[in-house]
Image: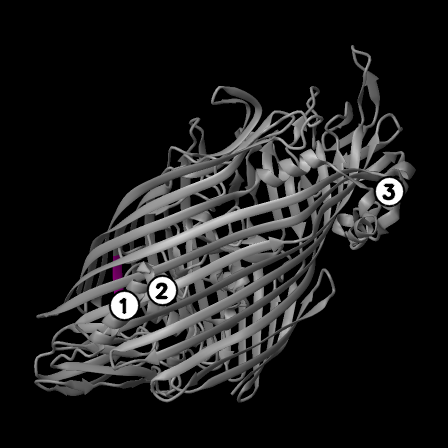
Amino acid sequence: MNSTARLLAGLLASASFASIAHAGEVSGNVYDATGTRALQSASVRIVELDRSVETDRSGNYIIADIPAGTYTLEARYVGAEIESRTIEVPQAGSVSGDFDMRAIGGGDILVVGQAANLSSSLSRQKAADGVESVLTRDAIGQFPDQNVAESLRRLPGVNILNDQGEGRFVAVRGLDPELNATSLNGVRVPAPESDTRQVALDVISSDTIESIEVKKSLTPDMDADAIGASIEIKTTSAFDRKKDYYAVRAEGSYNDYSGDITPKGGFDFSKRIGDDFGVSGGVSYYERKFETDNVESDSWKKTDGGLVYSPTVEYRDYDVKRKRFNATLNFDWRASDTTVAYLKGNWSQFDDHEYRRRTTFDFGDALDITGSGNNVTIADTQVTNSKGKKEGGFTIERDLKDRFERQRIRSVVIGSDTDTGTWKFNWSASYAKSSERENFSVDPMRFAKDFEGDGAAIRWDYSDPRVPTYEIASGADLVNSASAYEFDKLELTTLSDSQDREYAIKADLARTFAAGNGDFTIQAGAKQRWRKKSYDFNVSVFKGYDGDFTLADVLGEQTYRLDGISLGPVANKNGSADFYRANEGNFELRKYDSANDSAASDYSIKEDITSAYALTRWDSDALRVIGGVRMEHTRNVLNGNVLTERDNKKFDSPLIETVQIKRNYTDWLPSLTVRWAPQNDLVFRAAGYKSLVRPKLSAFAPKATVNEDNEADFGNPDLKPYEAWNGDVGFEYYFSGNGAISFGAFYKDVKNYAVTQTFDDYTYKGTLYDQFKTTINGDSAEVVGFEASFSQAYTMLPAPFDGLLTQLNYTYTYANGTLADGRKISLPKSSKNTFNVVLGYEKGPIDLRLAGTYRDKYLDEVGASAAKDRYVDNHFQLDFSGKLKVLENLRLTLDVININNAKFFAYQNFADAQRLLQFEKYGPTFKFGARLNF
């Protein structure tokens, strides 16, 4: 009832504001000269009063409280000629001031292609309150890349962390993606995965996106839950355009590694129904099949004789099929001259079907390890110990994973924006839900053979630090015999259900007072968020089979091709699941293990956030100052299971204790932002503010497990949120044509950053554990860096070089912290150096772009010591995009992703060398198709 009452009050307030009129005002809209597209963030200025405003996304603006008289009205937009006109403002009422902007040189302003994207992005960046980078679509709906994550890769200070060769998670200024927040049409997007707050942005197709804004500094009216950046994604609006628009796309995708061609297609539209109502939206579908060859290792060891070797090596062969569905539907209504109401919905689905065949060499019990340098031979020789028991040998496991996972993100928001020139009132109510679900996954079915004095020996060559190779020195017939590998274990995921939903309602009210040479604004607002995240996991663990069951019964063929390595006999992709279904009664269920593994990961968390803010704002043509404070009060209810081992011969489950913990805290977050433009083409910025990032929900759930080896994994409900004081300074210079150069420095003093650590022989609350894993707060961290960018469309050059375009940016980040034990580390996921380069050419029917992205190595996971830390190596990737206009409304497209076949390499620094932990190879992907606009 309270929420309903607030919503009705907001609607009534919007309606009442719509009826207010003010004497002496000018209003209008700004479009390109063709009348196709509204120009957002065009600057409209009354020269004599030095008062200016920026147009909204519909190209509209309003300036109120203007004394009667004759004035010069001026409009500016990056890449366009300055337009001006004389207006007569009456004693009462409103005067119209519309503009149609033309490109520099007098031609129609570009609204299609790379130059249009650049012009729109730079205009929004220039008009922004704080430090911001922007990507936009052009007038025919073209976005630079295939999904949101890939598009963001091009922006200054932004890089992408890949998964299976695809960009998924966004890192800003070299920092962990967990330090970002993501919103869609103003709605905070919850995470589908059970163990993270970050959102994998490849789920959202770029086909339905109008713009992406990466806000690197915060003002009091923004949610304060970001230290890296607030990433704000906006879908289309019918008011973005003056003309109706429809587009159809049909493409094919080919992966060089798998050899498969898969479809991609979509449809989007924008339709005005009269002058005051519009509907826009779209649907898209993308199917991708690809293969990945992978090799992984556990932490390396050294023998007493100084020989370095890997105790566990896994060769993994992935066959993956991914499907992405996206749909948006947006309604916009101009309720009056001053109020626009909206209803926006988004639905995204990501299906991931993964087959993984794996061969694992486990040398944990091996004693016969010989060789020198990079050549090591490990034999299955056994010896008799002092107790008369035999020791030594090794195990080879061959397993199959058959996992289907579905992620969904859906959101809906309703609200209105009112701007009378002197009063502004905005309200919205929203709902968002994300989920990730598995119903039946073989993860994995494992076959194993213990080699104990069978005469088998494996000879290893570690000379390639990324890909160790092997040959069977003896016992090859037995090692490669499928029938020798008996059924060992089946883990059947019957349910993996992650749910994350959030309701929110917010309102903002502002009053602007006209001064002699600017505007003074007082603004306040409040927001309430109700969030609940839960995870329910059920697994059936089977050990033993009533009958004969070996790898030979489900034998398949491998497609592994990394360095000519053979996985040996492997399981058929569908055979394991089919065999289980046909012989379910013969598999022997381990009730205790099933109950233990099912209960260990379950949790639910409620997180309610009440926030309010107040700010003041000064705006003139040259100076903008925004200062204020935000309060955020957080309330958590944490539920989890604490598991204690019991005798599995007497009990069917461990002792399961359900724990609930309540906590709350309040943060006061001051902010000051200054934007100074001493001349039209030069902008200086400075910002200081405090922000926070709340702990990863799965990490501070009160859950704990202790296994039979006295190894413990504990959640930490005492985790504190990251707290950061942030500072930004910089400048931007905008060229007379379509281009700009910028430089910015940033500093962050971070308290309570969190890391997951594993400790050996650790005492917790009076109990000694052989191994203890948990997430803890570090002491402090310092982030210092700078970013520089250069963008230019070379329209001033003689033909044919006037079609060239470049975008260059570089970011340096120093991010170091101190652990609780005093050890100094680089912050996890932070890269010291990142850069992006885009070389483009568009002229006539041709549109070409070559993009290169680089990020430095980063610390991925913190180990018990520096020698056990996990690092991910640097990454450089080249992508190409080409379009050919064959008819006025028809374009052919070609995209090549990962031209240079960039790989993934993770390692540890052990015994004076980089030692493999993970290596993956994907191959390039080709996309080709056609796009029809009408």
How crowded pointer 2 is (Cα within 10 Å; few <14, some 14-19, many 20+) is rated as many
Q: Are marks 2 and 3 in contact (CB under 8 Å)?
A: no
Q: Residue at 39% across / 43% down in the picture?
A: 636
Left or right of 446 on screen, residue 63:
left
Marking on residue 429:
2
Q: Is residue 223 magenta?
A: no
Residue occupied by mark 3:
550
Tell me the kind of residue under disc 1: Gly
- Of badges 2 and 3, nearer the viewer stands 2
Residue occupied by mark 1:
10
SS at mark 1? helix
Tell me the kind of residue under disc 3: Thr
Distance in Å between CA atoms under marks 1 and 2: 10 Å
> Which residue lies most toward the right here?
477
Q: Residue at 17% across / 78% down in the picture?
A: 20
Left or right of 901 on screen, residue 581:
right
Question: For the magenta stretch, what is the residue range?
Answer: 681-685
Q: Residue at 61% across / 69% down in the picture?
A: 286
Instruction: Depth check: give the residue in front, 615 or 317.
Output: 615
Main SS class of the magenta portion in the image: strand
Give coordinates of residue 524: x percent, y percent: 21, 59
